[in-house]
Amino acid sequence: MNHRTNENGTQSQPSKAKKLGITVVFVLFVGFVVVLLGYFAEHPRPTPPLPSDEQHAGLNDWKSCQDCHSDQGVSPLPETHPLKKDLCLRCHLPQGSDGGTDR
């Protein structure tokens, strides 16, 4: 705790008003974080499904994705892609399957 030294050399406790102010700010901050987390839990970023074209038909293994989407492939993942390598089919599901558009 932060103590102040008075003119006579004794230490005084922070005032009740200051303690209350710090508590109120802390509670408001925690409340804001909880609301923000709740919002993002209810509104996840959309995840695009696998394209329904001939190249993606029947994919069921992440290794198949790497043929085209590895760093040396014809369509590498962008640097901004959140996950790499072996997690493709965790988020990207075939169109029409449950969860193919949202995480």
Image (cartoon, rainbow, N blue to C red):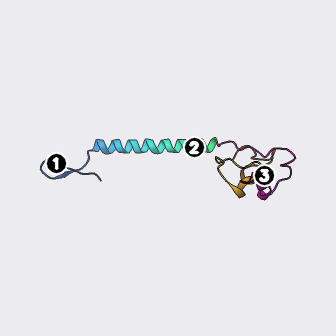
For the image, the number of numbered tags is 3
Dot placed on the residue nearer the N-terminal end, 1 or 3: 1
Instruction: Give the amino acid type for the residue marked by disc 1 in the picture.
Output: Asn
> SS class of the residue under badge 1?
loop
Dot placed on the residue nearer the N-terminal end, 3 or 2: 2
Dot 3: within a 10 Å radius of its alpha carbon, few (fewer than 14), some, or many (20 or more) residues?
Answer: some
Q: Is residue 89 above or below residue 32?
A: below
For label 3, the residue is 68
Magenta stretch bounds: 44-71
Q: Is residue 1 above or below residue 52?
A: below
Residue 41 locus on image (x, y percent):
61, 45
Picture residue at 58% right of the left edge, 41% below the top? 39
Dot 2: within a 10 Å radius of its alpha carbon, few (fewer than 14), some, or many (20 or more) residues?
Answer: few
For label 1, the residue is 6
> SS class of the residue under badge 3?
helix
Residue 29 in which image quadrant:
top left
Instruction: Give the amino acid type for the residue marked by disc 3 in the picture.
Output: Cys
The label nearer to you, 1 versus 2, is: 1
> SS class of the residue under badge 2?
helix
For label 2, the residue is 38
